[in-house]
Amino acid sequence: MIKDLRRILAVWAAKAIGTACRLTGRQGVTLAGKAALLICPNILTELAEEVRGPIFVVCGTNGKTTTNNLLCAALESEGKKVICNRTGSNMLNGVVSAFVLAADRRGNIDADYACIEIDEASTVRVFPYFKPDFMILTNLFRDQLDRYGEIDITMNLLKKAMQMAPDMVVVVNADDSLSTFLAMDSGNEYVTYGISKQYFEEDKDSKEIREGQFCKRCGEKMAYRFYHYSQLGDYYCPKCGFRRPGIDFDAVDVKAGQSLAFKVEGRRIQANYRGFYNIYNILAAYAGGRTAGLVLKNFNKVLKDYNPQNGRNEHFKIGKTDVILNLAKNPAGFNQNISAVMEDPAPKDIIVLINDNDQDGTDISWLWDVDFDRFRDINASSITVSGIRCQDMRLRLKYVDIPSELEPDVEKAIRRKLENGVGNLYVLVNYTGLYSTHNILKKIEGERHG
């Protein structure tokens, strides 16, 4: 009885904190989870046990939130009840919040599935509470060296987590040699997805940073038949024979540009998004659902109705200006952002916000690994740098002879371009700028529509 009372009290406290934070315009998700754990330390285990069907977790450097939310939407389109941390709060307290905020007043869960995005380094903290049935592993890129260290550290943490859940099936991006090696090395059953045919013509002048250049099995320099981007592509080790495995969910007849399309399992998949990298996100969600035995008969409708939120290609219409807000937090992600913006041939204004708060990583040297030279070919009417480290961003652009305007206050920068811009605005932000910039755009959108 005391245990049940503590659980109910934890749920009530979390819901009260969540409501208070929403009313005051604060995010507050992690605070709700932290409070619930303090009151009832075993609450995550107890609630996870009430989920009737499989629990999916999504890990990887880039694409976690989009993949996780797409999979959740696909499950919900089949009439399933799903627990999901949609906001992208993906450390232990955020995961706890997803469950406690979905519980009823008696502290019980009514859910068929759970789709939980988890920060790679947090997996070893979350998995002691529950053992997922499936892990979708999107990719492994260098990300925030001062927080995570080199990729080897992240891989070791993920391997430890995988071994905590030996019955968990890993749905892995086979085009990434690092993710593939990890899945193979873990001992878990794994299923692959990827793009087996070359899509881009080789760019011999590309300055893109490629991770995983040496074979994780024997240390030899890896060879590639072709790249898609960064280290993703058709790789093999000329010494030990490690290579891209056969692909279970293979995207073929790929089209990218103003929209995306491909075939998988003979089905034509279409989405009105830009950015080649979103092919992987869509394919990962599809492969995860299908691996779990779902038909996903409404998958194309899900993609048609899906409205990206939380700053992942989120669209705003403010007056006569179209605004796209997107997260760009590491070299691989930023380079793909640039590629996506280049697919829009129209004149455009660009705002780049760079912060160096703890959650961003205080080391911003990664900016020098982004191929900003391509901003010359992006048809930009203006480029504005903003955020705490706007001067560093301005210096980075100066080194490739690209002029920029300086405005540390992103709200002022946005309002200026809404008044005097070309009606087509891209706002690219790193992690801690995401939520605040989203709120600024929602506020301005409300002012104009009010």
Image (spheres, grey):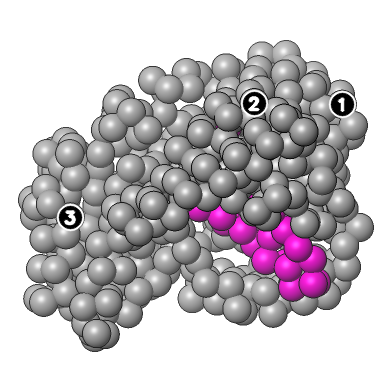
Mark 3 crowdedness (10 Å alpha carbons): few <14, some 14-19, many ≥20: many
> The residue tagged with tag 1: helix, strand or loop?
loop
Q: Which residues are magenta?
A: 66-93
Does residue 164 appear left or right of residue 260 in this picture? right
- Image mark count: 3
Closer to us: mark 2 or mark 3? 2
Going by the numbered disc 1, the residue's amino acid type is Pro
330 vs 239, nearest the viewer:
330
| Picture layout, residue 6 above or below residue 313 | above
Mark 2 crowdedness (10 Å alpha carbons): few <14, some 14-19, many ≥20: some
- Res 41 label: 2
261 vs 113, nearest the viewer:
113
Examine the rendering and report whether any part of residue 220 can be seen.
no
At 68% across and 37% down in the image, what residue appears? 5
Q: Which residue is mark 1?
A: 166
At 58% across and 72% down in the image, what residue appears? 306
- Find out whether the residues at labels 2 and 3 contact each other: C-beta distance under 8 Å: no
Query: Label 2, label 3: how many angstroms apart (C-alpha)?
Result: 40 Å
At 54% across and 38% down in the image, what residue appears? 33
Q: Is residue 371 magenta?
A: no
- Find out whether the residues at labels 2 and 1 contact each other: C-beta distance under 8 Å: no
User: Where does the image place residue 424, in percent across and percent down from the top left?
Assistant: 27, 75
Q: Which residue is mark 3?
A: 410
Quadrant housing residue 122: top right
